Amino acid sequence: MLLSAADVSRVIEMAWEDRTPFEAIELQFGLNQDGVIKLMRSQLKLSSFKLWRERTHGQTTKHAKLRSPEVSRHKASHRVKQF
């Protein structure tokens, strides 16, 4: 799958976010966890990639199946200001 520069940027952003599971990236961009790792390895400096891997390795919030019920899908609540 060929991603645009904007898509690559968004995948990197989502991968760095603690609460975005790999499954969400796969659903949106078709990249499974291994694909995300390969993309991150190719796009980041080695030191940044190592830092990212340390943060995500074994992190339960990056895997939907391991997530706590408290880390549910957060939906912004939009309220209309009433006057």
Image: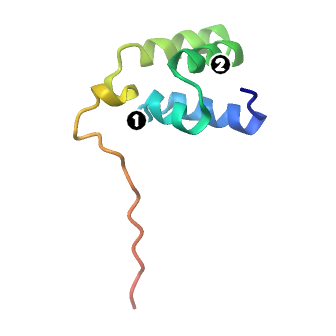
Q: Quadrant of residue 18?
A: top left
Q: Residues within 10 Å of mark 2 (few under 14, many from 20)?
A: some
Q: Quadrant of residue 43?
A: top right
Is label 2 in a helix, a strand or a loop?
A: helix
Q: Which residue is mark 2?
A: 39
Front residue of this view, candidates 65 and 48: 65
| Residue at the spot 61% in from the left edge and 29% down from the top edge | 12
Q: In the image as oriented, which residue stretches furthest toward the bottom? A: 83
Which label was assigned to residue 77? Answer: none
| Residue at the spot 32% in from the left edge and 24% down from the top edge | 60
| Residue at the spot 41% in from the left edge and 58% down from the top edge | 76
Q: Tell me, yes or no, whether the two marked residues, 1 and 2, touch with CB atoms within 8 Å.
A: no
Q: Residues within 10 Å of mark 1 (few under 14, many from 20)?
A: some
Residue 77 drawn above or below residue 22: below
Q: Of the residues shown, which amino acid type is indicated by label 2?
A: Leu
Front residue of this view, candidates 3 and 49: 3
Residue 27 drawn above or below residue 52: below
Which label was assigned to residue 19? Answer: 1
Residue 49 drawn above or below residue 31: above
Across and down, in percent, residue 29 comes to 61, 34
Across and down, in percent, residue 15 comes to 53, 28
Q: Quadrant of residue 1?
A: top right
